[in-house]
Amino acid sequence: EVQLVESGGGLVKPGGSLRLSCAASGFTFSSYNMNWVRQAPGKGLEWVSSIALHTYIYYADSVKGRFTVSRDNAKNSLYLQMNNLRAEDTAVYYCARAGGSTWFSDHWGQGTLVTVSS
Amino acid sequence: QSVLTQPPSVSAAPRQKVTISCSGSSSNIGNHYVSWYQQFPGTTPKLLIYDDNERPSGIPDRFSGSKSDTSATLGITGLQTGDEADYYCATWDSRLSAVVFGGGTKLTVL
């Protein structure tokens, strides 16, 4: 069974940093592209970042230059380093497995809440 | 303002059919596969349709996807009260080099 478990969310002040982790199991992590998607309270889904198997990394314009996605295939883990956080980054952050070359998300974690507030 | 445009809400009676539209452009829907997600309040999104019209294992055939030019449609037949949820379309946008989501559509089964 595919499982994705996010951790690392919490309350942080504007300008602060957080590192989210996503522990993957039940599939060969190194063979899949991965996505981060967020959802602000009461709002819709917003794509944050995608990381391919080897080379390609993509970011939403809203987080480019502030967020960094990475993966450790040996640890079956995905990460999202978030710096210079803003109030508008407040959201539930989901880790999702990309099911194909077009980046659709076929399995999602339960999400971790990031709250940016003073 | 989302790159993909969905109606904020749709409604229909039980056992009826409803369609949810998703409008885009040549840089996204027009040249890339569309996926659809279902999300109940307070829960994780679930993949309903991928590659325009393919259903993952376990998704009933009451759910279908189609695409024409720069628009995609999710169809749900035999509506049930349990289908009340938010539905999102998504695809890749080659001009933005980004995954783009629609704003979401709230389905009400009257």
Image: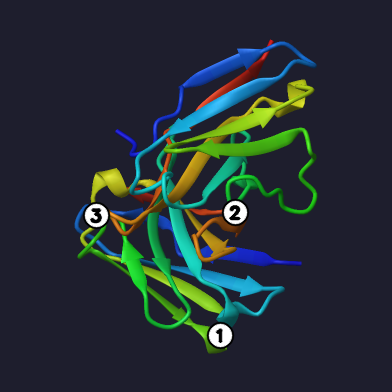
Earlier along the polypeptide chain: callout 2 or callout 1? 1
> Three-letter amino acid code at disc 2?
Gln
Earlier along the polypeptide chain: callout 3 or callout 1? 3
Above or below residue B108? Residue B102 is below
Q: Find residue B90 and name its label.
A: none
Image quarter hosting the N terminus of chain A = bottom right
The residue shown at (42%, 51%) is: B31
Residue A71 placement, left or right of B97: right
In-front residue for pair A55/A16: A55
Above or below residue A83? Residue A46 is above
Q: Chain of mark 2?
A: A
Q: Residue beneath label 1, please?
A: A75
Above or below residue B2? Residue A78 is below
Residue A64, percent from left and from top: 23, 61
- Whether callout 3 and callout 1 share a subunit is answered yes
Q: How much space separates mark 2 and mark 1, taking CA atoms?
A: 19 Å
> Three-letter amino acid code at disc 3?
Asp
In-front residue for pair B24/A45: B24
Residue A107 placement, left or right of B98: right
Q: Find residue A61 and name its label.
A: 3
Q: Chain of mark 3?
A: A
Q: Residue beneath label 2, please?
A: A110
The residue shown at (62%, 29%) is: B85
Residue B104, percent from left and from top: 48, 32
Q: Which type of secondary structure does the marked residue at label 2 adopt?
A: loop
